[in-house]
Image (cartoon, rainbow, N blue to C red):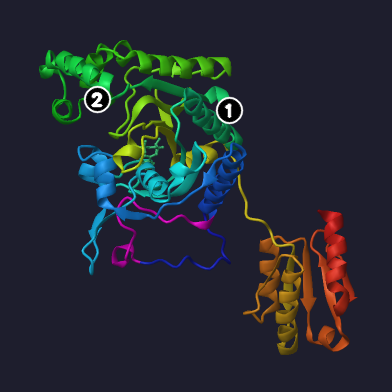
Amino acid sequence: MPRKVNQPPLKRINKRRLLQTPRGMKDILPEDYLYYDYLIEIAKKTLEFYNFRRCEPPVLEKAELYNKGIGSNTDIVEKEMYTLKTKEEGEFLALRPEYTAGIVRAYVENGMFNWPQPIKLYSFGPIFRHEKPQAGRYRQFYQLNIESIGDSSPALDVEVILASRAFLENLGFNQSDLEIRINSIGCNKCRSIYIRALVRYYKQHLKDICKDCRKRLKINPLRVLDCKNPKCIAIKDKAPSFLDYLCDNCKDHFKNVLDILDNVGVSYVLDKTLVRGLDYYSRTVFEIRKKDKDKETSLSLAGGGRYDYLVKLLGGLDRPAVGVAFGVERLVEEMKAMRRNLEFPKPKVFLIQLGDAAKKQAFILLEKLRKANISTEANLEKDNINSQIKNADRVNAPYALILGQQEVLDGMIILKDMTSGLQETIPFDRIIEELRKRLARKF
Ligand code: AMP
């Protein structure tokens, strides 16, 4: 875009000489933070309406929590965790690579198992994973996380799905653009039988699958179903389905989840290849995707499921649980694509001052206006009237106040309606009352 003649030239800096954010991390600038703020507001309204309460574990936890909770053979723990050793105590800590393990630690440590169950919690904060940076994938990103701990009822699986769907709808998504993919990966008992069948099947195709899948078969066989390599797709499509291997209890649980979803009119897609990347999942697993009308693909907005063994694994009682995590950066991108334009609130008044005596008065008046809840902007660091008027225009406030030497002497102030351009001189001690009246008429 050509620059206007009277615009000052942009000041440039040599980026190579600058200290920059670490790879895969980014600043959230004010224009973007508007979206994060809005998202938190909608999450709070929706989830508290569903009776979830906010709970925040620390960003740093003992690394052992994740080794134990998520599983040491998972990508997150094996390759992606940011860890550090503290200088004095030599404690081995990790930056949170996901929320659930920390929330479960908090549940056990704070004796929440003694409170009426289930415990319904939500959290919002940064997540750190040392992944390969690529479009839409960061090394520091934000998640909105929802957990319901303390009960194995299928009703809780459905409640988490319904709360998630309500949150997305309140954010502006159309129900018809969302797709809920669901599967069951059984309990410890039926999972070992299924994994044996899966490995047996894949062993017949070792030559035709990718190197990663051959490795996965040895250390974490379920993850072969997650493989996106085109080479493995046909093999994966013909793999045995977990649903044929579920034990009676897990079959019953999954059937109940689907029945309730049917009864409340939530459509879903059964996806026999849906597994989750972390070891702690059991029974129901699901993903919420945004359908892409132009492509076959869809974008994952959230992933969740049951984790019935995690509380006990982390030293608690036998307390089943279910939860979901949303990727906030993706939601922000989608909100922008849906043309949800968010703006900062505009100040109602711009205060202009001229001369030393006026500047002194202006400081006092500015505080008074703000205390009276009339949002006011000023450039008290500037003396030049033209640049103050220019800023008043840019800020787009409906009223300007002008205080010069003469007005200070007369105990008056000029009130300018920025829409009509009309100016009036008003006694200084009546200005707050006057503004209140006029703003009440305008807004
Ligand atoms: P997960 O914790 O891996 O189940 O991911 C839950 C959601 O977080 C996904 O659906 C994504 O929207 C989001 N997500 C996961 N990894 C990243 C990343 N590296 N950068 C941005 N968003 C991510």
Position in image of residue 433 (x %, y %): 87, 69
Left or right: 350, with 153 as reference point:
right
In the current view of this chain or complex, which residue is farthest to the left? 207
Along the line of sight, which residue is nearer the eye, 150 or 255? 150
Q: Quadrant of residue 251?
A: top left
Crowd band around label 1 with a 10 angstrom C-alpha radius: few (<14), some (14–19), many (20+): few
Name the chief secondary structure element in magenta.
Answer: loop
Q: Amino acid at mark 1?
A: Asn
Circles 1 and 2, Cβ within 8 Å, touching? The answer is no
Position in image of residue 28 (x %, y %): 46, 54
| The residue stretch that appears in magenta | 14-30
**Eyeballing the image, is 55 above or below 440?**
above
Instruction: Determine which residue is flagged by label 1.
Output: 174
Mark closest to the chain's N terminus, 1 or 2: 1
Crowd band around label 2 with a 10 angstrom C-alpha radius: few (<14), some (14–19), many (20+): many
* Element type where label 2 sits in the image: helix
**Eyeballing the image, is 373 above or below 76?**
below
